[in-house]
């Protein structure tokens, strides 16, 4: 059975995408179509802030893309040396909060120690931060994307937690999305399941999926990586067959396999 994954390939990763691999272990053949394209912005400001850890109470990362922006800031050799010599340890003396395993792995590559990788959602992470941190710390620094949800900033501010956000990447529809979807449906036909990985992914794909599946739309098992994405699919009037218990390849593949039994 065919599964269509509407997500970005893993950054600079070697070997097959973990989602394709996990689904294959359940006897399912998956294809990946990238939905989003990203443009990095405000990198000079980001760089300045990264090298002034004393002005912040800690760091928050809720997406792999934000960590990628940091990595770009450290590409200059002298910057990386300074980071490795002293700056990263100053950040590690504070808390570096993350959502999800993919983001945590990238944060470790920067030499930082992530906290909260099992939280899975910004909502749960915000509770962890509120429990752990004192409200009289310097502001926590949160580099994020242009389509960030307000759950985490709102929760922290409501609890008097100082926060400074900076938009470091802008999200847009992938330029080849429509063409790639059309090709997929022409060659592979109607997939047994379609998995969505973000509310913006739902927003950019849903019309094309409706158009291309036609009367077969109701036969497709729609899968969501988490509760926020699930809500976005439901808001489009579609039935969600399964949602991953945690936002990992293992959990999503298990949920899809069970839904297709």
Image (tube, rainbow, N blue to C red):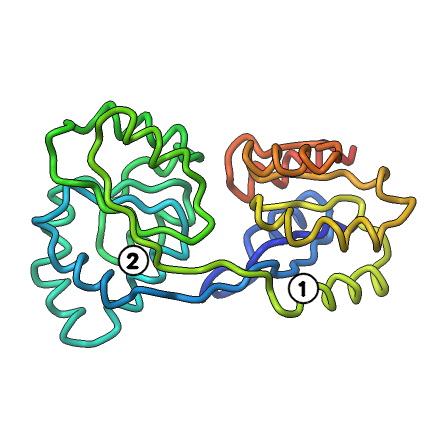
Rendered location of residue 133, percent (x, y): 18, 29
Secondary structure type for disc 2: helix
Q: Residue visible at 22% across and 51% down?
A: 112
Rendered location of residue 94, percent (x, y): 14, 41
Q: Residue visible at 80% across and 45% down?
A: 192
Q: Residue visible at 24% across and 68% down?
A: 44
Q: Is residue 160 above or below residue 236?
A: above
Q: Is residue 8 above or below residue 151?
A: below
Q: Residues within 10 Å of mark 2 (few under 14, many from 20)?
A: few
| 223 and 204: which is toward the camera | 204
* Pointer 2 with pointer 1, Cβ within 8 A: no
Residue corresponding to mark 1: 177
- Residue 109's disc is 2
Q: Is residue 89 above or below residue 132?
A: below
Q: Residue visible at 46% across and 62% down?
A: 11
Rendered location of residue 241, percent (x, y): 72, 32
Q: Residues within 10 Å of mark 1 (few under 14, many from 20)?
A: some
Secondary structure type for disc 1: helix
What's the distance in space between the residues labelled 2 and 1, CA to CA? Answer: 30 Å
């Amino acid at each position: 059975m065919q599964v269509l994954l509407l997500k970005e390939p893993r950054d600079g990763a070697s070997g097959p995408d973990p989602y394709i691999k996990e689904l294959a272990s359940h006897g399912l053949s998956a294809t990946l179509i990238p939905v989003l394209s990203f443009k990095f912005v405000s990198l000079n400001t980001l760089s300045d802030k990264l090298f002034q850890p004393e002005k912040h109470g800690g760091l928050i990362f809720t997406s792999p893309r934000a960590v990628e922006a940091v990595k770009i800031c450290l590409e200059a050799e002298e910057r990386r040396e300074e980071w490795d010599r002293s700056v990263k340890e100053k950040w590690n003396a504070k808390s570096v909060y993350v959502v999800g395993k993919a983001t945590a792995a990238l944060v470790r590559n920067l030499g930082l120690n992530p906290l909260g990788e099992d939280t899975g959602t910004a909502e749960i992470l915000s509770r962890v931060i509120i429990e752990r941190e004192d409200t009289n710390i310097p502001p926590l620094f949160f580099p994020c994307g242009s389509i960030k949800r307000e759950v985490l900033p709102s929760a922290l501010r409501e609890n008097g937690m100082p926060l400074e956000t900076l938009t470091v990447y802008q999200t847009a529809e992938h330029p080849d999305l429509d063409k790639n979807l059309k090709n997929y449906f022409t060659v592979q036909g109607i997939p047994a399941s379609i998995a969505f990985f973000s509310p913006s992914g739902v927003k950019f794909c849903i019309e094309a999926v409706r158009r291309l599946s036609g009367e077969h739309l109701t036969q497709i098992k729609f899968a969501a990586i988490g509760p926020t994405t699930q809500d976005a699919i439901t808001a489009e009037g579609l039935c969600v067959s399964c949602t991953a218990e945690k936002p990992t390849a293992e959990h999503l593949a298990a949920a899809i396999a069970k839904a297709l039994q």
